[in-house]
Image (spheres, rainbow, N blue to C red):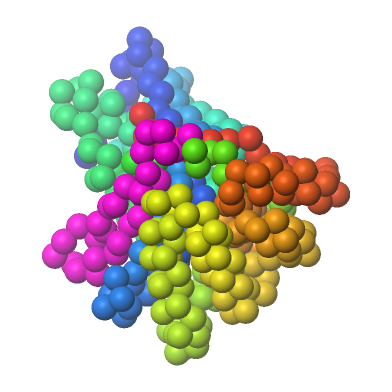
Amino acid sequence: MELGNISNLLKENPIFASAPCRIDFGGTLDISSFHYPLSHLRPTTVNLALDRRTTVSLKPNTDDRIRIASAGFDDAAFDPGVAPYDHPLGLMFAIADYFAVKGVRIDIQSTSPPRSGLGGSSVAAVALIAAFSKVLSGMGRGQIPREKAALLAHAIEQGVAGVPCGRQDQLAAAFGGINAWTWTADPQQTPFVRTPLMEGRSLDRLNRRLLVAYLGVIHSSRDVNGTWIRQFINGQHRGYWKEIVELTQAFATALGSLDMPAAADAMNRETALRKDMTPEVLDDMGDRLVAAAVRCGCGARFTGAGGGGCMWALGEKDDIASLKPQWEALLARRPTAGVLECRVDPDGVR
């Protein structure tokens, strides 16, 4: 899918695309190591897109090189096809190489904290593919549908990472809203079935029952996910994962009907299971936030694979109102931590 040097095209028409980040429940089940052996249980992941978007812009570069700037990382520039993919921005260079593009400056701006467990790199990947898709459209070659953009972003990311990766981050970025994703585990079919759980005014009702916080500590999902994958392959905690499948399905049902007590119960039980498998998913701050949520009758869960990053809570409106100042007081102990003001984003990539 060669685009070549697009600097002249971008001089007249710089291109922008954005996609939302996400919070999640049942993550890891979207990794094939889990959902193929557990396919008889219909493994499901739930995610909620948040309106903290990542925006990618394409502008002309002065030569054939690909130059990328992203907050939190040093700027980088490489000739086409020679960038190391283990570079902090390697995924973005790999996507540029997939499109065989030259002469472009890629600027990435995110309204969520870097490496915060909200799916940031996958979100940026979907937005970048959407931006290049717009270039294709301008050339009369057709745009890439959002489903294909999500699957392409996942395929490139998994290839660059060199380890199994899930798809839920890319799908939340592509579709937005609140969805359950059932993993079909059938190589002859689309790898997921999407079930929207909530739309319209229900989203506004949920926003008043939702709390998201940044722990002030960056996370590395690869470490924890790698531990879970090794444990599962070695035959450890298989019963836990079967229970996580059941809890995720129960959570999806509860969330779809705004049954906050049932949703909170599923969250707290799933968090406890994961902490039992990998205690490092929650640090002392995370433990305190979970304890406060439980005392207020809310559910709490880390985002992604935990180990820093963000946490989120659900509960009845009054319970969340009681929990918020408690979380704020706890988070104030770290200068970089705090509650994130955000809402569910009904839109996907655009």
x and y, in percent, of residue 203 in the image = 44, 38
* Residue 114 visible in this rendered orientation of the protein: no
Residue closer to the observer: 203 or 187: 203
| Magenta-drawn stretch contains 227 | no
Asked whether, in this view, residue 3 is left or right of residue 304, the answer is left
Image point (44%, 53%), residue name:
255
* Residue 323 visible in this rendered orientation of the protein: yes
x and y, in percent, of residue 222 in the image = 54, 64
Asked whether, in this view, residue 304 is left or right of residue 217, the answer is left
- Quarter of the image with the C terminus in it: top left
Asked whether, in this view, residue 145 is left or right of residue 128, the answer is left
| Magenta-drawn stretch contains 184 | yes
When the figure is inspected, residue 248 is found, relative to residue 255, above or below; the finding is: below
Asked whether, in this view, residue 99 is left or right of residue 230, the answer is left
x and y, in percent, of residue 280 in the image = 68, 70
Outermost residue, top side: 12
- Asked which quadrant contains residue 250, the reply is bottom left
Image point (58%, 49%), residue name:
316
Image point (57%, 76%), residue name:
273
x and y, in percent, of residue 81 in the image = 38, 44
**Which region is colored magenta?**
178-204
Outermost residue, right side: 333
- Asked which quadrant contains residue 6, the reply is top left
- Asked which quadrant contains residue 149, the reply is top left
When the figure is inspected, residue 67 is found, relative to residue 121, above or below; the finding is: above
Residue closer to the observer: 178 or 73: 178
Residue closer to the observer: 344 or 153: 344
